[in-house]
Image (cartoon, rainbow, N blue to C red):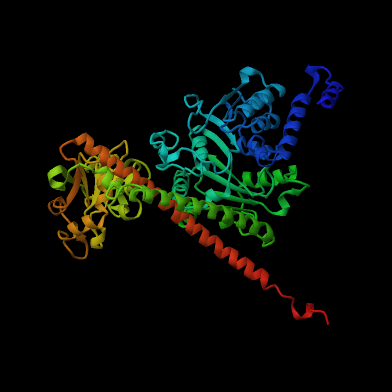
């Protein structure tokens, strides 16, 4: 430390007004970067390398002659914000630099970094706190530029906090990011803070671009609403704390076309290998920014892909799905693949343990007295249960006819009965399709708390499936659906409608033909078990407890199914790679005599 202070004392700072070099700030950032480089995994938590920061800043502010302010929702030591300051003349960032940081020490580093880079206190606002749970700046004017390198695949509250699905940041997507992987929660947060003219550049873990489940649904929301401008695959080992080849996701709210651009900058032509980490040189950044600006297709480097192709590919946003590589990065790819499989296996083991814990909760502990082990027995102890027909406890409203050609991109939310089989599960808050308001005024709707029940289908098994509508707005329903209103917990009824016990009752009243169907009279004869029927409040409490454990079981099962499928696909690639490697025997002419 004494040597550092002596070194600083010997620096010639000259006159402040004449200086164009930020000696103190650069020295401070140099010390931070060297600490990060030697801090292992933790180093990446607070510092983004300057060469990567430069690329991210240029992406976020590309072709913007001025921005109102720039924001980093996980700002660490502030390196991304300050790179924007270095790269652009100060006057075009009008209202300054904004950020939020969870770690108290790093938060102080960021503020000190601002002062040492000559950012006046009235030109920055760095807040301490959890960006996802307690966000700041939500009531401020949206940001024209957002840069971020959030922590990869960290845990967050997710579905454990029932208020989050109604949060303005996450509600439009209709689903929350998985509790074990908050990556898309940061993405949706950034998107909600972005202005209509703005652009966000976010560093992302590559797995979020191809995994299924909730992450696929969020990708669908982003693509369907034309927010994804570009996905860039970077070289491995650019960041402190990870050797993985991460991606940059560029979001925009002012795209003029529906194509999505994919750039593969992970090859040896786009980085320089150094002792501990790879680096991006200015020439590499210029190459990336050049094709980002032009949106030209370049073999093995960049491809602009039509919306329809992305949809047909299951909303997969992995760069390798669209940009063919030259086949010269096998070693890097297999190390990345092996790392991904290792993480998948770890996550699968955790999900299996979660399911085992749920099953144990349902079955009860072996240490409990006999007869008091089962979850339902404990829940219904001394509680009467009465089976009542649907027609006696609620009312049916049948929808009116409209056709698929009536569906439009914006308007009044609606559900066509064909979508019930493919897009809707136990509950929904957001409709996939919309219909013209003038036509909608002539049709019938389901309101919040109703259960939308299928009344027609090609097979008997299609009949009777229900979706609890939990959206704030009413939704128009097709004439092959009923909106059922009752005082039951809508999700409880929706779950029950899919049980074999209920299906057996419904089958008795289905009219068979080319299209099977059921009327409200037949559907109304199906009976539902109602716990504690004479005490409505207690009955709803019991229904909610059953729903909670079913929701938990469903969520974990869906994620496990997705992870198993992803592991199987990865194992096939792994097998093919190693098979090829093991059979690379020398050709006859290469064998020594």
Q: Quadrant of the N terminus?
A: top right
- Residue 14 occupies quadrant: top right
- Whether residue 408 appears in this view of the structure is no
- What residue lies at 80% left-to-right and 19% top-to-bottom? 18
For the view shown, which residue lies furthest in the bottom direction? 593
**Closer to the camera in the image, 152 or 386:** 386
For the view shown, which residue lies furthest in the right direction? 10
**Closer to the camera in the image, 582 or 175:** 582
Q: Is residue 468 above or below residue 210?
A: above
- What residue lies at 28% left-to-right and 49% top-to-bottom? 495
Q: Is residue 485 above or below residue 496?
A: above
- Whether residue 17 appears in this view of the structure is yes
**Closer to the camera in the image, 272 or 3:** 3
x, y percent for residue 96: 61, 24
How many numbered marks have been drawn onto this rendered protein structure? 0
x, y percent for residue 320: 59, 56
């Amino acid at each position: 430390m004494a040597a550092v202070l002596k070194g600083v004392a010997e620096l010639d700072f000259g006159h402040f007004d004449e200086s164009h070099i930020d000696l103190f700030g650069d020295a401070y950032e140099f010390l931070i970067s060297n600490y990060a480089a030697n801090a292992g995994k933790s180093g990446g938590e607070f510092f983004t390398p300057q060469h990567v920061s430069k690329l991210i800043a240029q992406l976020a502010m590309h072709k913007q002659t001025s921005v109102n302010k720039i924001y980093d929702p996980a700002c660490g030591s502030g390196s991304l914000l300050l790179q924007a300051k270095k790269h652009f003349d100060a006057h075009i960032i009008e209202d300054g630099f904004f950020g939020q940081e969870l770690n108290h020490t790093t938060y102080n580093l960021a503020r000190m970094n601002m002062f040492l880079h000559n950012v006046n206190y009235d030109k920055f606002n760095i807040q301490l706190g959890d960006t996802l749970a307690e966000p700041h700046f939500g009531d401020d004017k949206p940001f024209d530029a957002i840069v971020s390198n959030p922590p990869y695949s960290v845990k967050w509250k997710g579905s454990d906090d029932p208020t989050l699905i109604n949060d303005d940041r996450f509600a439009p997507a209709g689903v929350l990011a998985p509790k074990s992987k908050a990556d898309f929660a940061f993405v949706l947060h950034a998107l909600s803070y972005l202005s209509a003219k703005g652009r966000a550049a976010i560093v992302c873990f590559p797995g979020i671009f191809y995994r299924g489940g909730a992450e696929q649904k969020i990708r669908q929301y982003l693509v369907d609403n034309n927010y994804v401008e570009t996905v860039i695959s970077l070289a491995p080992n650019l960041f402190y704390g990870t050797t993985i080849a991460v991606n940059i996701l560029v979001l925009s709210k002012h795209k003029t076309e529906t194509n999505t651009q994919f750039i593969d900058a992970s090859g040896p032509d786009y980085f320089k290998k150094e002792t501990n980490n790879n680096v991006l040189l200015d020439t590499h950044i210029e190459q990336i920014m050049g094709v980002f600006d032009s949106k030209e297709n370049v073999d093995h480097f960049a491809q602009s892909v039509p919306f329809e192709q992305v949809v047909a590919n299951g909303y997969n946003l992995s760069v390798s799905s669209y940009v063919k590589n030259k086949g010269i990065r096998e070693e890097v790819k297999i190390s990345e693949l092996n790392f991904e499989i290792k993480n998948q296996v770890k996550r699968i083991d955790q999900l299996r343990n979660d399911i085992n814990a749920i099953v144990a909760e349902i079955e009860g502990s072996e240490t409990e007295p006999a007869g008091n082990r089962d979850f339902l027995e404990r829940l219904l102890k001394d509680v009467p249960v009465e089976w009542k027909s649907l027609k006696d406890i609620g009312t049916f409203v049948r929808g009116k006819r409209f056709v698929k050609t009536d569906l439009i991109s914006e308007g009044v939310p609606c559900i066509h009965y064909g979508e019930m089989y493919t897009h809707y599960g136990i509950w929904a808050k957001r409709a996939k399709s919309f219909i013209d308001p003038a036509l909608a005024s002539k049709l019938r709707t389901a309101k919040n708390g109703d259960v939308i029940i299928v009344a027609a289908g090609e097979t008997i098994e299609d009949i009777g499936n229900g979706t609890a509508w939990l959206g704030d707005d009413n939704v128009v329903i097709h004439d092959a659906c009923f909106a059922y209103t009752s005082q039951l917990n809508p999700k409880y009824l929706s779950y029950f409608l899919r049980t074999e016990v209920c299906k057996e009752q419904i089958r008795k009243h289905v009219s068979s033909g080319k299209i099977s169907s059921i009327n409200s009279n037949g559907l109304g004869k199906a009976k539902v078990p109602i716990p504690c029927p004479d005490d409505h409040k207690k009955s709803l409490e019991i229904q909610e407890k059953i729903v909670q454990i079913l929701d938990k079981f469903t969520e974990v099962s869906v994620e496990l199914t997705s992870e198993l499928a992803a592991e199987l696909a990865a194992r096939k690639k792994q097998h093919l790679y190693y098979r090829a490697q093991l059979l690379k025997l020398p050709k006859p002419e290469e064998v020594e005599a």
